[in-house]
Image (cartoon, helix red, strand yellow):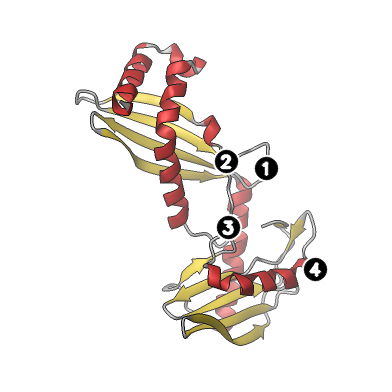
Amino acid sequence: MKKALILLIVTICLHTPSVLANHIQPIQSLKSVLTPTIQEAITSYKNKKTTYAPYSFTTDFHNIQIKDIAKLNKENYYVIQVLVSTYEHAHNPPNITFNLTVLLTPVGHRVINIKSKEDQEARKINAFYKEAVSDIAQAFQLNLQSYKAYNTTNIPAPLRPFITKIIVELNPYISPPYKNVISPITFLKGNRGFIVFKLADGTNVKYELRMENQQWKIISKEKRPGKKMKKTLIWYM
C-alpha cells in the first residue's frame, strides 16, 4: 500500500509543478511516508560520523523539505531530493543541514546518498576541538589514529561516571558566552584507552584506562603543560 501511495504521490507531483511550492496534501503525504526512512538514515549517519565536540542535534523532522523530484528512464523509478535541518530557532547554534537523495522504485525506497552541511559555529567548534586534541596528543606523544573517539554524548555507559566527575571538576572554569576548555574526549581500542581534556590555563590532562575483569579502571593520571586556548568556544560545547 505504501509503495503504491508513494508512486501515486510522485506521479501527481510530477504533473503538478505548483505542488512543491504550495506544500499541498500530496507532498505532506509523501513526507509522512518517507520520514521513517529519513530518520533511520540520519541516525546511522550521525553514529558513523564521530566528532570530538559533544553534539546533540535535534533534527526537525516536522519540517522536511522536498526540494526536487526527478523521473528516471526506468518505469516508476524516481529520485527525490530531501532537505532536513536541525532546529534553528528553538535551540542555540551550532546547526546542521542534511541533504538526502532517496531512490524510489516499484519495490520500495531507500536513501542512496546523504551529505551534511555545518554552519559557521559548528565549523569553528570542530576546529577548536581538533586543535586542542592535537596539542594534547603532542604533549603526551600519543598516536590515537587507531583508537575510536567518543565525546560526552556517545560515551559507553560504563565510562559515564568518570566523564561526569571530570565535567563537574571543569564546570567552575565555564561561564557564558565563551570558554577555552574542552569537554573530555575518550579514545578506546580493545581493552585500553585514554580520557583527555584541557584545563583553562592550557594544562593537558590524560587518564589512562584499562579493562580489568570486564570493568574499566583508571590506572594513571598525568598532567603536562600545553597551549592555552583563547576563549572562543561557545560555552555549552
Q: Disc 3 or 2, which lies upstream in sequence?
A: 2
Quadrant of the rendering where the N terminus is positioned: top left
Marks 1, 3: nearer the viewer: 1
41 on left or right of 167? left
Where disc 4 sits, the SS reads: helix
Residue 17 in the figure: left or right of residue 87: left
Marks 4/1: CA–CA distance: 24 Å
How far apart are labels 1 and 3 at the CA level?
A: 19 Å
Q: Are marks 2 and 1 in contact (CB under 8 Å)?
A: yes
Q: Residue at x 56, y 63 (%)?
A: 52
Q: Is residue 183 left or right of residue 69?
A: right
Asked if residue 57 is positioned above or below residue 60 in the image, the reply reads below
User: What residue is shown with label 1?
Assistant: 91
- Where does residue 6 sit, x and y in percent of width and height? 34, 24
**Which residue position holds label 3?**
126
- Above or below, comparing residue 224 to residue 79 in the picture: below
Q: Position of residue 3 (x, y in %)?
A: 30, 27
Q: Position of residue 137 (x, y in %)?
A: 55, 77
Dot placed on the residue nearer the N-terminal end, 2 or 1:
2
**Residue 34 screen position, x and y as percent:** 40, 32
Inspect the image, locate mark 3, and give the three-letter code of the amino acid beneath it: Asn
The residue tagged with tag 1: helix, strand or loop?
Answer: loop
Residue at x-position 75% and y-position 74%: 201
Query: What distance separates the C-alpha of mark 3 from that of mark 2?
Result: 17 Å
Please, what is the three-letter code of the amino acid marked with disc 4? Pro
Q: In this rendered view, identify the residue nearer to me: 37 or 141.
A: 37
Quick one: label 3, few (<14), some, or many (20+) residues within 10 Å?
Answer: some
- Disc assigned to residue 172: 4
User: On the image, which quarter does residue 158 sit in?
Assistant: bottom right
Read off the residue under disc 2. 86
Is the residue marked by circle 2 packed among few (<14), some (14-19), or many (20+) residues within 10 Å? some
Q: Secondary structure at mark 3?
A: helix
